[in-house]
């Protein structure tokens, strides 16, 4: 069978659909990344910061009380929530900041949804003394006010985007416009496994550490690979980082969990694989929520980090070839998962991660007690307390 | 040679620079499209670039974004613009160039889109988010048609890349004059003219400069170093404010021959 091996393609997905002004920057980035990958010093430097600054490796934790309560497969949590800045996003921000400096670029632009990627990028920029501008949707600024303050404390400039629905998609649009205008001295630290080649590959590689550690840790603890691995999908960076080292292990079932918002059938959701059509957004060919005329639709999710109308190109391909199953959990389901994990384990997950928790609980329940499920706990819930309290009315009984 | 290139060359042969206004289709209502096209035609433009509104126009600045948002709110789509243009055939004889982002074309279906463009008598196509590397399938569909593929080169494109892009160009090559999005500019980079001259040396089809050009003086100055200009945001704003005289003045600036003083 002739496999399409075009550069930056995952099957038919991916590519580089960007204005010509950005092409040189993408080619430069591709070359710089190729060189960095081959440079042992780069790896050593990144490993140093991941260990001493981020606090890796983080634990793979056996959620014993949750497992008991669910009464099925053993549930393990990969504790990305314990990273410095509270989510997996820092793995990528640090890697790309080091890459930017290799290219001689000391100005950084980024987009952010939940604010986690913005905080992670502002942190990396503070660490290395880089200038940082973060675009964030107006609605997300409202939902994640404290993260805005954190970014500003870290020295970043946060720019509010009130176009469209004022969420992640609109923030990416503005970040791209800013990058086009400042491309000669600025690097764009894209926060998920999205965008034009080589971003999906770079972000995946910097997030692969999640899956690489998990694989080693589960073998140490249980003497074997897990039966299933679960991660939530916004653009897909924590999931692809977790899944990638397991893709060749056919015995390991992989589940990506999209945000079903009010329910996929209501149209108010962010489940691009469940309900999207193939198309181009932000430089890549992917599954995209769109109408019949090809206009991009707004995504809806209680979690700002999943509120994006497409899914990264490699996931689209993994879906097409059937290697990863993509499921969707509603806002209500995520809130349930969040409360359950909080009470049974003393861990308050990010709303994004709570989607994965809720699905994993259902899955584990259907599996045998001798089986193993690993969940990527991509971030901690501190940032979501306002949102959650607004919904639960402070009345968690 | 496709019609669009022929027209630009004829215009240049008469000692004039090509003037291509950009307008947002359906801003102010799709019903007004024909009237606006006829106005521009009578004002003496060389060709007209017709922008299709899009939900996520990443290459556009405020003026065109807002015009697009108005058109979208009015229900304007790639499909109904092409249908309206088909109704303008006969009366509108100036070459028409469609400028659209890629996703509406993909949703339409590439072969179906090209067929609809043929029906509507379209003479050129600009897709700002379809760079050289990704444009082959679409260019193949255009090969046997009179629809010219108009690629963009930027200030960041190296010479050898400009050469490869220029080779793919039909009709004209679109030389982007700023690093950035569309919208009026007061100043351009100091080396803008030498950049444009370099592009002209490399390229065999006509070279038109666009992005940021918004005054008659800029039209004249940019025209001095190219085969013509594209004016977008200024036209869009003028239509929106009903300042038609401004549009006439911009067009006139491309017709008046200027003495180049060294
Ligand atoms: C904690 C957390 N998990 C997941 C995501 C979703 O992003 P991705 O799919 O790229 O992992 C985000 C995004 O902001 C996040 O903050």
Image (spheres, rainbow, N blue to C red):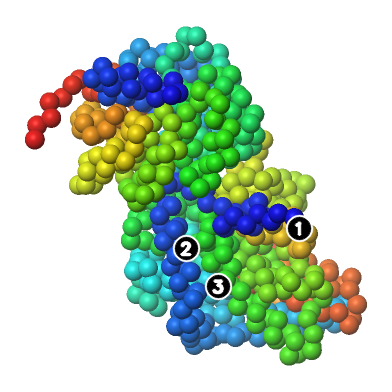
Split into 4 quadrants, where in the image is the N terminus of chain A? bottom right
| Mark 1 residue crowding within 10 angstroms, few (<14) / some (14–19) / many (20+) | few
- The residue shown at (55%, 41%) is B136
Chain of the residue on which disc 3 is drawn:
A
Q: Nearer the viewer, mark 3 or mark 1?
A: 1
Query: Considering only order in the chain, which callout, 1 or 2, is on the residue closer to the N terminus?
Result: 2
Judged from the image, the secondary structure of the residue bearing numbered disc 2 is helix
Residue B13 locus on image (x, y percent): 27, 19
Element marked by disc 3: helix
Same subunit: marks 2 and 1: yes
Q: Is residue A216 left or right of residue B238?
A: right
Q: Nearer the viewer, residue A230 or A65?
A: A230
Instruction: State if disc 1 and disc 3 touch (CB < 8 Å).
Output: no
Image height of A134 relative to B173, above or below: below
Q: Which residue is mark 1?
A: A321
Residue where numbered disc 2 is placed: A30
Q: Is residue A218 visible?
A: yes
Q: Secondary structure at mark 1?
A: loop
Q: Residue at x 47, y 28 (%)?
A: B148
The residue indicated by pointer 3 is A206
**In the figure, residue A65 lies in which quadrant?**
bottom right
Query: Could you tell me if residue A338 is visible in this image?
Result: no
Q: CA distance from mark 2 to mark 3?
A: 14 Å
Q: In the rendered structure, are the residues bearing label 2 and label 1 in contact, judged by CB atoms less than 8 Å apart?
A: no
Disc on the earlier residue, 2 or 3: 2
Question: Residue under mark 2: which chain is it in?
Answer: A
Q: Residue at x 35, y 41 (%)?
A: B176
Q: Position of residue B243 (x, y in %)?
A: 32, 21
């Amino acid at each position: 069978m002739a496999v399409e091996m075009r550069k930056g393609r995952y099957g038919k997905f991916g590519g580089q659909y960007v204005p010509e002004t950005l092409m040189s920057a993408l080619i430069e980035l591709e070359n710089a990344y190729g060189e960095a990958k081959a440079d042992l010093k780069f790896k050593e430097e990144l490993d140093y910061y991941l260990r001493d600054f981020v606090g890796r490796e983080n634990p793979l934790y056996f959620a014993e009380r949750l497992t008991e309560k669910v009464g099925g497969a053993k549930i393990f949590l990969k504790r990305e929530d314990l990273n410095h800045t509270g989510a997996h996003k820092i793995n990528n921000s640090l890697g790309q900041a080091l890459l930017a400096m290799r290219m001689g670029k000391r100005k950084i632009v980024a987009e952010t949804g939940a604010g986690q990627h913005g905080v992670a990028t502002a942190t990396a920029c503070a660490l290395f003394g880089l200038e940082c501008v973060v675009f964030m949707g107006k609605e997300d600024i409202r939902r994640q006010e404290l993260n805005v303050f954190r970014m500003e404390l870290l020295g970043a400039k946060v720019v509010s985007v009130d176009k469209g629905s004022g969420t992640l998609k609109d923030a990416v649009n503005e970040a791209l416009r800013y990058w086009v205008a400042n491309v000669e001295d600025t690097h764009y630290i894209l926060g998920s496994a999205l965008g034009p080649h080589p971003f999906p590959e770079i972000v995946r590689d910097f997030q692969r550490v999640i899956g690489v550690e998990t694989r080693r840790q589960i073998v140490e603890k249980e003497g074997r690979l897990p039966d299933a691995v679960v991660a939530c999908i916004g653009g897909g960076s924590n999931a692809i980082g977790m899944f990638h080292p397991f893709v060749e292990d056919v015995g390991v079932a992989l589940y990506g969990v999209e945000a079903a918002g009010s329910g996929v059938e209501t149209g108010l959701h962010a489940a691009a694989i469940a309900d999207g059509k193939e198309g181009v957004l932000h430089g890549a060919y992917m599954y995209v929520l769109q109408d019949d005329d090809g206009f991009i639709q707004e995504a809806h999710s209680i979690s700002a980090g999943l509120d994006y109308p497409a899914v990264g190109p490699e996931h689209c391909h993994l879906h097409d070839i059937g290697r990863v199953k993509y499921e969707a959990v509603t806002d209500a389901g995520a809130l349930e998962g969040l409360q359950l994990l909080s009470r049974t384990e003393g861990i308050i997950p990010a709303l994004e991660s709570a989607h994965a928790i809720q699905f994993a609980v259902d899955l584990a329940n259907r599996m045998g007690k001798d089986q193993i499920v690993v969940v990527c706990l991509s971030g901690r819930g501190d940032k979501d307390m306002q949102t959650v309290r607004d919904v639960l009315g402070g009345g968690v009984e | 040679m496709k019609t669009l290139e022929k027209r630009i060359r004829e215009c240049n042969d008469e000692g004039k620079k090509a003037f291509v206004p950009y307008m947002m289709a359906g801003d102010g209502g799709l019903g007004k499209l024909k009237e606006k096209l006829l106005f521009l035609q009578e004002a003496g433009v060389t060709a007209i670039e017709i922008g299709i509104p899009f939900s996520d126009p990443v290459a556009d600045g405020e003026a065109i974004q807002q015009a697009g948002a108005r058109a979208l709110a009015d229900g304007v789509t790639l499909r109904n613009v092409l249908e309206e243009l088909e109704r303008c055939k006969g009366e509108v004889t100036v070459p028409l160039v469609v400028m659209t982002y890629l996703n509406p074309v993909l949703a339409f279906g590439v072969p179906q889109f090209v067929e609809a463009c043929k029906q509507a008598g379209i003479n050129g196509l600009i897709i700002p988010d379809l760079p050289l590397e990704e444009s082959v399938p679409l260019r193949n569909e255009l090969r046997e048609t009179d629809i010219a593929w108009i690629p963009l080169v930027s200030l960041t494109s190296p010479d050898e890349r400009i050469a490869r892009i220029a080779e793919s160009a039909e009709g004209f090559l679109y030389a982007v004059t700023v690093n950035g999005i569309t919208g009026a500019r007061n100043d351009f980079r100091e080396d803008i003219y030498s950049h444009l001259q370099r592009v002209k040396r490399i390229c065999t089809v006509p070279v038109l400069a666009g992005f940021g050009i918004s005054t008659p003086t800029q039209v004249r100055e940019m025209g001095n170093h190219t085969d013509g200009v594209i004016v977008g945001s200024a036209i869009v704003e003028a239509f929106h404010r009903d300042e038609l005289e401004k549009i006439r003045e911009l067009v006139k600036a491309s017709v008046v021959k200027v003495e180049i003083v060294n």
